[in-house]
Amino acid sequence: MKKVQKPLTEVESNTLATLENFRFSSCTKLGSKRISNHDAACYIFYTCGWMSSGRMRHLLRIWRAQLGVRAVQVWAVQMQASQVEAALVRAAQAGMKLHFTYLFNGSDGPGYGFVGKDFHSESNELWKFTYDTPTSGFLGKKTIINRKTYWYRCGRDKYALTAFGSERGAALKFAMKGILKNVA
């Protein structure tokens, strides 16, 4: 059974209200009003401060569920009234089922590696394998890439921004504010 989350604070509500204007994308393109999960998490950490991974995953689920509901509302004009409510429920449930646990992996090697070792961490080494053909198996080339670390574990299930994460969060906030000001 999942742990019951505390109600949203005013800061968390305002942060999610801003994020609600941006759709999910695998890479961030704020000019197109798209943001990745890890940049959304960085923005949340920047505006709300340190928190547990469970709370962060909860906030990200709310954001993604809101996106699903809003998408259904756009299409609701073309749906019958009986279908709209069911579609809204399904969209919200789909968003709330997302796990986001990969955002808290910090090991070197293959994987995601968003979590730094301490406040001064800048990147993690990750392995990327490329293959000659889809059927060539494991005979591909191993490439080492450095992924920027936005947050680090500061205590038992407590995470806070790294120095690089603070810079990224400030840049995201400034850019998002500018984009939303131009739209409004």
Image (cartoon, helix red, strand yellow):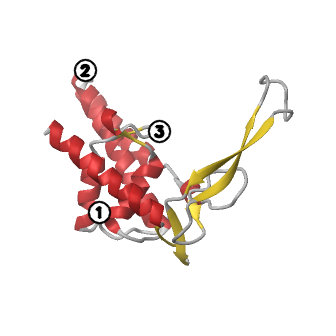
Q: Position of residue 136 (x, y in %)?
A: 85, 26
- Secondary structure found at label 3: loop
Q: Answer with mark 1 or mark 2, whichever residue precedes in sequence.
A: 1
Q: Answer with mark 1 or mark 3, whichever residue precedes in sequence.
A: 1
The answer to whether residue 1 of the structure is visible from this angle is no
Which residue has dot 2 on it?
78
Q: Amino acid at mark 1?
A: Glu
Disc 2 crowd rating (10 Å Cα; few below 14, some 14-19, many 20+) is: few
Cα separation between marks 1 and 3 = 23 Å
**Front one among 3 and 171:** 171
Which residue has dot 3 on it?
27
Q: Which mark is residue 12?
A: 1
Q: Position of residue 25 (x, y in %)?
A: 44, 37
Q: Judge whether 135 appears above or below 161 on screen.
A: above
Q: Residue furthest left?
A: 184
Label 1 vs label 3, nearer the camera: 3
Label 1 vs label 2, nearer the camera: 1
Quarter of the image with the C terminus is top left
Residue occupying the point 16% across, 38% down:
182
Cα separation between marks 1 and 2 = 33 Å
Q: Amino acid at mark 3?
A: Cys
